[in-house]
Amino acid sequence: MRVGDAVLGLMSLLLGALVLWHVRGFPEVPGHYFGPGLFPSAIAAGFVLAGVLLMVRGARRRRAAPDPDGQPAAARTGAHGMAGAALAVGAILAFIFLGETVGFQLLALATLSAFYLWAGRRWLEILLLPLLLTLALDLLFGRLLRVPLPAGWLSGHLFW
């Protein structure tokens, strides 16, 4: 069974709206500009935005004319889309089961590289962008926000 972008977009929009409605009841923290609802609200707003964009894309694809062999563009991307979904699920499972052992930095580098390779990027992008993004994520979460990221195999070998 194939679910269209418009349906997934509507589901994403409804999920984001539900989370936004739920977090409005979170308590305020006295003396702070933000409370416990900030990050869930930001993520929910992203779900709403992604839902709207998916619905627009679904509407555009529905209006698109089929190609010469008679199949619409959405039908030609099935195997590639399934591979991307499998890659995403595999990345999540890798972070769950290997996160403590391997470490965030190495897993982020490996999964981002795999995603860029799957997307068909140039080799310079496959090598450079995942490295820069991993360093940026480690700096943002591990250093600035002080989220404890597992170092794994790099324990004791990190530069900062």
Image (cartoon, rainbow, N blue to C red):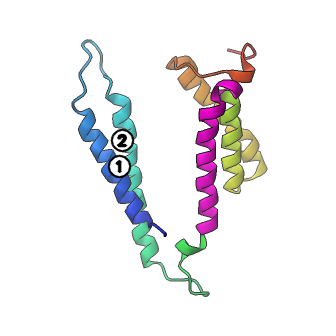
Q: Amino acid at mark 1?
A: Val
**Which residue bears the numbered disc 2?**
44
Q: Main secondary structure of the magenta part?
A: helix
Which residue is labeled 1 in the image? 48
Q: In what quadrant of the picture does the C terminus appear? A: top right
Residue at horizontal 62%, vertical 42%?
A: 91
Q: Residue at x 78, y 49 (%)?
A: 123
Q: Circle 2: is it few (<14), some (14-19), or many (20+) Cα within 10 Å?
A: many
The location of residue 40, given as percent across then percent down, is 36, 34
Q: In 3D space, how far apart are the residues under numbered discs 1 and 2 (Cα atoms)?
A: 6 Å
* Number of disc labels: 2
Q: SS for tag 2?
A: helix
Q: Which residues are magenta?
A: 78-104
**Residue 160 visible in the shown view:** yes
Question: Label 2 amino acid?
Answer: Ala
In reply to whether residue 32 is colored magenta, the answer given is no
Q: Residue 101 appears in which quarter of the rendering?
A: top right
103 in relation to 67, above or below: above
The quadrant where residue 19 appears:
top left
Using the image, determine if residue 40 lies above or below residue 158. Answer: below
Q: Residue at x 65, y 35 (%)?
A: 108
Element type at marker 1?
A: helix
Direction from residue 143 to residue 120 in the image, left or right: right
Q: Position of residue 2 (x, y in %)?
A: 48, 69
Q: Residue at x 34, y 58 (%)?
A: 10
Are circles 1 and 2 on residues that touch, CB within 8 Å? yes
